[in-house]
Amino acid sequence: MAEARTLLDVRNLKKYFPIRKGFLKRVVGTVRAVDDVSFSVRQGEVLGLVGESGCGKTTTGRCIVRAIEPSAGSILLAREQGTLDVASLNHKALRPLREDMQMIFQDPYSSLNPRMTTKDIIAEPITCLQPMRGKILEERVVELMRMVGLRPEYMRRYPHAFSGGQRQRIGIARALALNPRLIVCDESVSSLDVSIQAQILNLLQDLQQQLNLTYLFIAHDLSLVEHISHRVAVMYVGKIVEIADTEDLFKHPKHPYTERLLSAVPKPDPLLKKARVPLKGEVADPANPPSGCYFHPRCPYAQDICSAEAPPLVNVHSDPERTHQVACHFAKELQLKGVEVA
């Protein structure tokens, strides 16, 4: 994986939402939903993006595919013609890039148009961007439906006739329609039953291997991220606080927030007595974040420097050829508890 080239390089990405008040709707502040985020994803890799609800994971994913407009930063996508900054393109120049990157949405109910048949939903990206019509288009829809485990004879049905897992398979087929290289999976299994989650997760893994896809896998369930991801990035209040290989991060977390997240992962063993490390306090307000490290009001290891100075995201791995990036002043001194990777 280390030899694969970088497909996506996000640099200093920001998304601030204005806070408006009064009759004239004057801007009185901003919500820092994504606050100076940087990371890269290699070709064929699965990068898990985790954190508490409201930390900015989904906003980051939507900015990358330009479903919403970023406030600042660069989103560099490698193509055969060269590297393009997705963040700087206008909507006309952005259209051809839809063939390179797509998104699987969280809610399989609201993400599908109830007035369109399955065939029309899956074929819509193709008809918008490629000159494919008639029988050839229908054959492509049949191929995509079989690829995600749906029966082609159901292509005339509407979304209400399908279960939640089947609807998510339709969403996956739609995302694959243009043969993209990068897919942003936004909590793509979190709204499904546990048994269906496993099926969809295995499907995503199989497709990733068959088609050499690259995933940005957004989730709040670390057990799912452990199962599918090669590397994991942890977000807290709009910032990346730790990035490492999955096994390294789970066994040897370097940030106190990551330690708390791992402590909350349930283990299906009634005989296992697991000592939990509770996470106290409230999540920082992204409209009025604390000074210094955003996590310091909840951190049991915090010292004076933590409230005065924001820690940079730096590599603390002992092996110079490997990376384990952490935004913590005491990452090298702390001995934090991890979990065993299955």
Image (tube, rainbow, N blue to C red):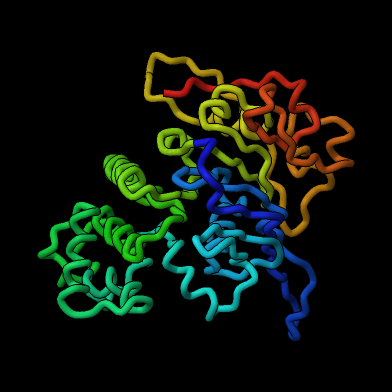
Q: In which quarter of the image is the C terminus?
A: top left
Q: Nearer the viewer, residue 79 or 41?
A: 79
Answer with left or right where residue 180 lies relative to residue 62: left
Q: Which of 101 and 275 is in front in this view?
A: 101
- Residue found at the very far front of the displayed protein: 81
- Residue found at the very far left of the displayed protein: 153
Task: Name the residue rendered at 49%, 20% in the picture.
Answer: 340
Residue 10 in the image: x percent, y percent? 63, 54
Answer with left or right where residue 40 lies relative to residue 163: right
Q: Is residue 44 visible?
A: yes
Q: Can residue 197 be seen in this view?
A: no
Residue 138 in the image: x percent, y percent? 18, 72
For the image, the number of numbered tags is: 0
User: Height in image: 61 above or below 201?
Assistant: below
Task: Name the residue rendered at 30%, 43% in the picture.
Answer: 206
User: Height in image: 176 above or below 155?
Assistant: above
Within the image, what quadrant is residue 11 found in?
Answer: bottom right
Residue 299 in the image: x percent, y percent? 74, 32
Answer with left or right where residue 76 lies relative to residue 160: right
Task: Name the residue rendered at 47%, 40% in the picture.
Answer: 221
Q: Which of 72 and 25 is in front in this view?
A: 72
Task: Name the residue rendered at 45%, 49% in the picture.
Answer: 215
User: Height in image: 82 above or below 53?
Assistant: below
Within the image, what quadrant is residue 19 found in?
Answer: bottom right
